[in-house]
Amino acid sequence: MMAKRRGDLLGVRAALSDRLLPVLVGAMSFLAALALGGALASATLAASWQGDTASALTIQVPQPTAQDAAHHGTRLAAVQQALAASKNVADVHVLSEAQINRLIAPWLGSDAASLGLSLPAIITGQWTGPGGTDQLTAELQQVSPGALLKTGALWAQRVAALTTSLQACALAVLLIVALVAAAVVAVATRSGLAQLRETIETVHGLGALDADIAARFAARATWLALAGSIGGTVLALPVLGWLAWLAAPFTGGSQFNHLFSLPPALLALVPLLPGCSALIGWATAQITVRGWLRRLP
Amino acid sequence: MVRFDDVWLRYRHTTRAAEAEALRGISFEIEEGGFRWLTGPSGAGKTSLLKLIYLAEHPARGRIEILGTRAARTTRREAALLRRRIGVVYQDFRLLPQLDAYDNVALPMRLARRSEAQVQADVTEILRWVGLAHRMHARPDELSGGEQQRIAIARAVVARPKLLVADEPTGNLDDEQAERLMLLITALNKLGTTVIVATHNTQLVQHYPFPRLGLENGRLVHDG
Ligand SMILES: Nc1ncnc2c1ncn2[C@@H]1O[C@H](COP(=O)(O)OP(=O)(O)O)[C@@H](O)[C@H]1O
Ligand SMILES: [Mg+2]
């Protein structure tokens, strides 16, 4: 009884109700957790795709067995020599007939070779050099007219653009969710202040400091926001686990046996959400109450 | 101790411009440990003058000094700390409805962060003094008007203010209770508390012949 008297002199507990505020802050935390998960997932996906893709080289050599431009040997051999001479190309690998068959099988059937088509030779490699591949393309064209060289740079650019916009979206969601949470706290605090107007005017007249009054509201708002946010975040965890499981094959990360394992970065960030919510609750209540008290002399 | 120099008070947001000036050119001084009646017909400006003393209004013009502090020169924090040294009995009591009599009286001490042991000792003593020790666990809505007024008085004096301001404190009391209240207030005054009591009870003023400030229509018409 004694502790309760001292703890809630103003009746803040009843005025800042324990229903709507935690539920809404909890919903915001749920969304924030998903947005965080999305941002991290797209970063992970991008990292695992981008590195390989950007530097991947594919060279097609049509009529690989025909004479090269300088009449020294086959076009394929000439292209291989040119690639070997270049400092900027590594891991050169000529696909075997079987590998090519496997590549085209979905389109042409399993025994494409028996159709007597003249297939180009395909060489893969890694572009290790700086800058573009224009000069190498020109060289290959010279020794083997019609040779085609492609890198994954354009594809990688697109992946990067997509990732950046996904992360911008996630950031926007986080920002909006934080603003909504702050608005919820501000509205609840204002309604509490309106309910306790006479009480607050009286204790103000008795010499209560603005800081004292604001602290009582802020403590209550902090607690409600924290409780709601913990609820919302905990509810988001299974959903995040499920999404991580869906994404696992693409990220090369966890396997089936880690059904509920989340990326470490996410596990580090998600517990910060209730802390951030509590901080938003505290700061918003402080600002709202102190602003309201300004009307008193 | 309390000093007014040509003080004017104007309520904003009033529709009738003629009545906007609640106080006009008020000057007086109350020495430390002094006692003043504040009299005048209803609407003369008694409550308005007391509000300036307990820092609930700012003057439009003039200079106010309370307990040695220029009222206009205080920060919000200093004003709050100054209010703690002024005990106020409001005309409408302003007890907190959710707290019982004990907690209402304890409020100023708890705001000043006194120890709970000291709160207990002082609150119990002052409740006994106003004759309401047996009602300490009653909430304001369970108390009569007179009892609420005595609780309001107990709250005003419990923290031993240097200055006691009472706005018609006998309004809800019968003659015998009014007598008891005056004994209490004069006792505090003898212990060194400066006291200002607004009233329109002329009998009481005659019975306790302290100096009197007379207000009429926002002007000071009597001082002495
Ligand atoms: N809050 C207020 N806003 C506007 N006018 C007020 C306010 N309080 C008092 N007044 C006006 O100021 C004048 C003095 O009022 P008040 O100080 O309450 O007189 P008293 O206490 O002597 O009855 C009256 O004309 C009253 O209408
Ligand atoms: Mg009055």
Image: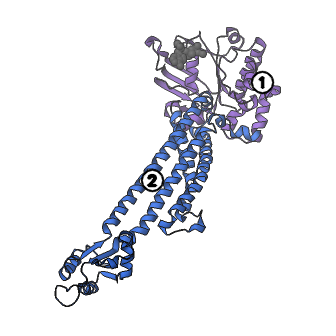
Chain colours: A blue, B purple
- Vertical position of residue B51 compared to residue B80: above or below: above
Q: Nearer the viewer, residue A7 or B5?
A: A7
What label sits on residue A289 in the rendered view? Answer: none
Q: Which residue is mark 2?
A: A170
Disc 2: host chain: A
Looking at the rendering, which quadrant does residue B18 occupy? top left
Q: Residue at x 39, y 68 (%)?
A: A50
- Vertical position of residue A174 compared to residue A191: above or below: below
Q: Position of residue A107 (x, y in %)?
A: 36, 69
Residue type marked 2? Ala
Q: Residue furthest right?
A: B134
Q: Can residue A127 be spotted in the picture?
A: no
Looking at the rendered structure, the secondary structure element under dot 1 is loop
Q: Position of residue A294 (x, y in %)?
A: 51, 33
Disc 1: host chain: B
Looking at the rendering, which quadrant does residue A120 occupy? bottom left
- Quadrant including the N terminus of chain A: top right
Residue type marked 1? Val
Q: Nearer the viewer, residue A1 or B101?
A: A1
Q: Is residue A100 left or right of residue A11?
A: left
What label sits on residue B130 in the rendered view? Answer: 1
Looking at the rendered structure, the secondary structure element under dot 2 is helix
Is disc 1 in contact with disc 2, using a CB cutoff of under 8 Å?
no
Q: Residue at x 17, y 80 (%)?
A: A142
- Vertical position of residue A83 compared to residue A21: above or below: below
Q: Residue at x 66, y 37 (%)?
A: A13
Q: Can residue A250 be spotted in the picture?
A: yes
Q: Splitting the image into four quadrants, where does ligand 1 fall?
A: top right
- What's the CA distance linking mark 1 and mark 2? 65 Å
